[in-house]
Image: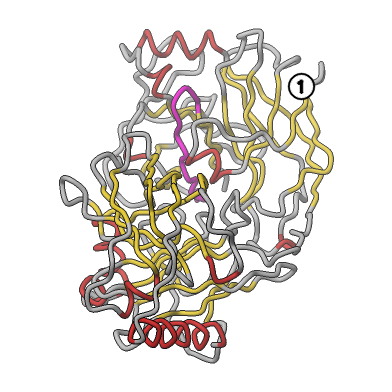
Amino acid sequence: MNRIIHALSLITLASSLSACGVSENRTLITASGVITPVGAAQVAGVALTLYGAKDLVTGAAPTVLSQTEVGADGTWSASSVDVGQVADALIAVTNEGADGGFFPTLSGVVDYSIGQSKTDLSSGRLFVVPRSLATLLATELGKPEMLEQGFVMGVVTNGVTPIAGARVKSASSLSLEVWYPTSDLRQVSRTETSANGLFVIPARPALLFLDLVAEKTGHAFATTLAPLKVGTCSFAVILPASGAETPKHLVDVAGLVTPIGASTAAGASVEALAPYDYATTSSPTALASSTVSDAGTFSWSQVDVSNVSQGLLARVGGSSGAFFPTVSGVVAWVSEADSDKRVSSAAHLFAVSNHLATTLSAALGQPRMLTDGFVMGMVTDGRAPVAGATIARADGHPLTVIYPNATFTGLSETATSANGLFVLLPDPSLAFAAITAVKTGASFQPGVLLPSAGTCFFVALHP
């Protein structure tokens, strides 16, 4: 609340100075950076306008400090931006884009109220929300009016990756209705941030600012001020408090790698991956790596999973070219609390041979399988493969499944053979889709698919 009072006092001071005919010297800077769409979207054609925060929120005709367009690669730059009379923050507001595909989005460029020097900057990280996502959120919240009134959206982050398991609230005593989009941006909950770290708050028309902070056990966050503007999404970034250290949470992982289409996986590399990083970037960061032993085992020691949400994945490959990059699950967290991030049993990974991937691609007449990536899986009772099971989407949508016979000499079975295996061809709709196995007298837990280009995502379906 103190920051809101401070902001309002600045507004009063600026008005008084203007009435007395006092003006500050011009201070020209060049600002540049990158704009990031929330979700997958092309930002080419989006234009942005720079304002002073208090002027935009309270001014009847706020002063335009600069206008520029976003490049196809998401970069933007504005020169000769006069920030001489900007006492709080320089902010950017995007337009709807050439095709009207974006919701007007406000995000901060630089905060001068904390003593930031008024010099050129190249680190302006802006955000823009697709109109389709804004409409979906309004529908999910049952608040269609928020598209006209405006709303706050934001991310809790350590500055590099989103933080899951955090709750957002007002830094004052104000009661807020906070919602959290799921990692696939298809639904919302009232519980905590998902893997994407996002939150949504319907705006109250009478307010000028929201003072926001996040909470998560073991973490400390700085307060951020979100200016509100009718018909606009104000995007707020909540960062760790200055000097705060993110607690490390370390786990040990060991297990077995089963080769599919090869006699041994010895010598293959095994990398630990964060699921959200793997699902949203083309080059996910390896959290740990090791080599498969002659006995087919692997191990990682002291993997830092403090900001790794959902669980752990493993990617098996190798410079020898013997294996097609294969990603399979290691463990799913009980919750996003660090204390619940445990690996209590041996991991069972899979490695699909390059020979098998190439053979399947040729036999199915699907050369793009190797570039677009595909899904392969096994139905198992926990000890051995299960024959006679069929695969279906949990949401009931149609699914084309290929069932190889036990010797991989045919691909026209109607259910899993003795090897328990199945194959799904490249299909964008399978991203984050849940599938399950169906067999009379048995029940299986669903598995979530994370297909990716140039990769075989391998899912094991257990009872």
Question: Vertical placement of 19 versus 88: above or below?
Answer: below
User: Which quarter of the image is occupied by the N terminus?
Assistant: bottom right
Name the residue rendered at 49%, 40% in the picture.
279
Question: Vertical placement of 414 versus 219: above or below?
Answer: above
Name the residue rendered at 75%, 15% in the picture.
266
Secondary element at image label 1: loop
Whether 314 is among the magenta residues is no
In this picture the colour scheme is secondary structure
Question: Looking at the picture, how far across and down is residue 126, in whole percent?
Answer: 42, 53
Question: Looking at the picture, how far across and down is residue 373, in whole percent?
Answer: 43, 24
Name the residue rendered at 35%, 77% in the picture.
202
305 lies left or right of 285: right
Q: Which residue is mark 1?
A: 292
Whether 447 is among the magenta residues is yes
Residue extending furthest toward the left: 99
> What span is in magenta?
442-456
